[in-house]
Every structure is written in C-alpha cells, then in structure tokens.
C-alpha cells in the first residue's frame, strides 16, 4: 500500500531542497511526478507557480487553494498517464479536507504522497494542514535545523522589518519580515523580552522575505 508522508521542520531547514531532490530522483528513473505548492506565494489568479529552495533549486508546480479537490485533480492527471508520486510543498496551508483527499490518493489510487511543510506558526500553534497530517500520515519525518545556542530549533520567530519580535497578527504575514528558527527556550525568552544578544543573532541568521510567509 502506498503511504502518506509528512516531512516537517522549523524555518530554513532545507525542506524544499529535499523535496526537489526526491522529485528529481523519480524523474531520473523515468517516473512522472505531480508537484504542488501553495497559492499564497503566487500572483493573484495564477494557476501555476514554482517550488524554490534557498540554495537555488527550483521546479514548476501546480497551485492549491482552499476548496480545490486534490483527489479529483490527481485522478484527472492519471487520465494522461501514470504517476510515480505526488509532492506537496508548503503543506501547512492545506485544509483538513485536502489532507484527507491526499490520504485517499495514497489509499485508493496507490500513489505515494510526500508532503513538506512547517509544523507550527510564529505563535507556536499548529497549522491546520500540519495538524491533520500529524494525525493521518503513515510516516512522519523531522528535518533538523539548529537554534543559535546549538540546540534543535523547533519554533519559528517572526521579526518585523525593524527587527522587533512580532507576537500578534495574522498567521500568514504579508509584510516584509524576517523569520528565525529557535529552540523552545529561546523562542519563549524572545516573546517575553527583547534581548540585545538575541537581536544581533537574529539579524545575522534570519531568513528575510517580502512574500506571504506563514510562521
């Protein structure tokens, strides 16, 4: 039986690069794949986007939005030929129903589904898609990245363009922000008090973005 996989981590761990390498491996063996990513990072009204890693790897991908039936979309694609696997980047943005649809792709269509995304947002709360994947996935895999202290980073801190810790606001940020992977201890310390040492480290190790990013 094919499986539903969820590979998760904090920001800047290289999830997209791992996805693209895995998809490339399928292609090298002559197996077609279907790539999906969230519409949150695409122009309004676009049907296709791209998955891009921080090290420069990229590939075109279809876009998913709330309300799209992913099972039906994969089933329609199968009419044109077999698929070796389905890959989903930014899987935290999936709805609960879409995760269940992907589980059906694995169970009913016999196609492995490999999802990659964040587990928690900048407040430390589970994303809807991540929560459902944690519940339904056959295989959970964590990609490790580290906090500035050397511990495993499991949390995502959001900083404003001026370097201030963002504690409130929408789960999906559209403002220019920086995102810092931290261990739980330093995440809570940053939320409680702005420290100059953390401020300096965050400025040198953060990933900046002016696109919608959910952390």
Image (spheres, rainbow, N blue to C red):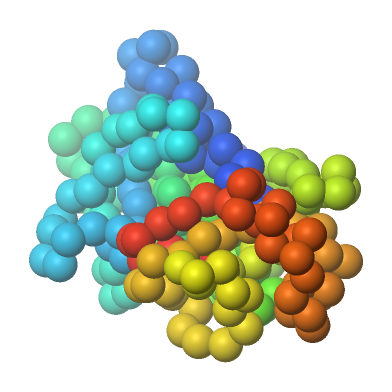
Percent position of residue 201, x then y: 71, 52
Q: Is residue 148 visible?
A: yes
- In the rendered image, which quarter is residue 136 located in? bottom right
Q: Is residue 103 visible?
A: no
Between residue 78 and residue 92, name the one nearer to us: 92
> What is the residue that sits farthest to the bottom in this orientation?
168
Q: Is residue 138 above or below residue 44?
A: above
Percent position of residue 77, x then y: 22, 43
Percent position of residue 173, x then y: 42, 74
Question: Residue at the location (34% across, 61% down)?
Answer: 211
Question: Residue at the location (44% across, 49% down)?
Answer: 89
> What is the residue that sits farthest to the left in this orientation?
45
Between residue 54 and residue 38, name the one nearer to us: 54
- In the rendered image, which quarter is residue 67 located in? bottom left
- In the rendered image, which quarter is residue 163 located in? bottom right
Residue 100 shown left or right of residue 154 in the figure: left
Between residue 183 and residue 165, name the one nearer to us: 165
Q: Is residue 57 above or below residue 93?
A: above
Residue 63 shown left or right of residue 8 in the figure: left
Percent position of residue 108, x then y: 45, 51
Question: Residue at the location (55% across, 75% down)?
Answer: 128
Residue 35 shown left or right of residue 208 in the figure: left
């Amino acid at each position: 039986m094919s499986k539903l996989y969820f590979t998760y981590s904090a920001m800047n761990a290289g999830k997209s690069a791992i996805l693209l390498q895995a998809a490339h491996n399928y292609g090298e063996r002559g197996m077609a794949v279907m790539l999906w990513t969230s519409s949150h990072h695409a122009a309004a009204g676009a049907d296709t986007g791209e998955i891009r890693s921080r090290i420069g790897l990229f590939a075109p991908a279809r876009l998913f939005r709330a309300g799209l039936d992913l099972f039906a979309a994969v089933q329609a694609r199968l009419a044109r030929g077999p698929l070796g696997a389905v890959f989903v980047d930014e899987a935290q943005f999936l709805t609960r129903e879409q995760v269940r649809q992907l589980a059906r792709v694995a169970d009913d269509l016999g196609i492995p589904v490999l999802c990659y995304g964040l587990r928690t947002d900048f407040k430390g709360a589970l994303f809807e898609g991540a929560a459902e994947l944690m519940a339904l996935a056959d295989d959970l895999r964590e990609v490790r990245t580290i906090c500035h202290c050397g511990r495993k980073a499991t949390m995502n801190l959001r900083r404003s363009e001026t370097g201030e810790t963002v504690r409130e606001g929408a789960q999906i940020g559209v403002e220019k922000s920086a995102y810092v992977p931290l261990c739980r201890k330093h995440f809570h310390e940053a939320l409680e008090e702005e420290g100059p040492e953390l401020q300096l480290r965050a400025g040198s190790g953060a990933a900046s973005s002016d696109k919608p990013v959910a952390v």
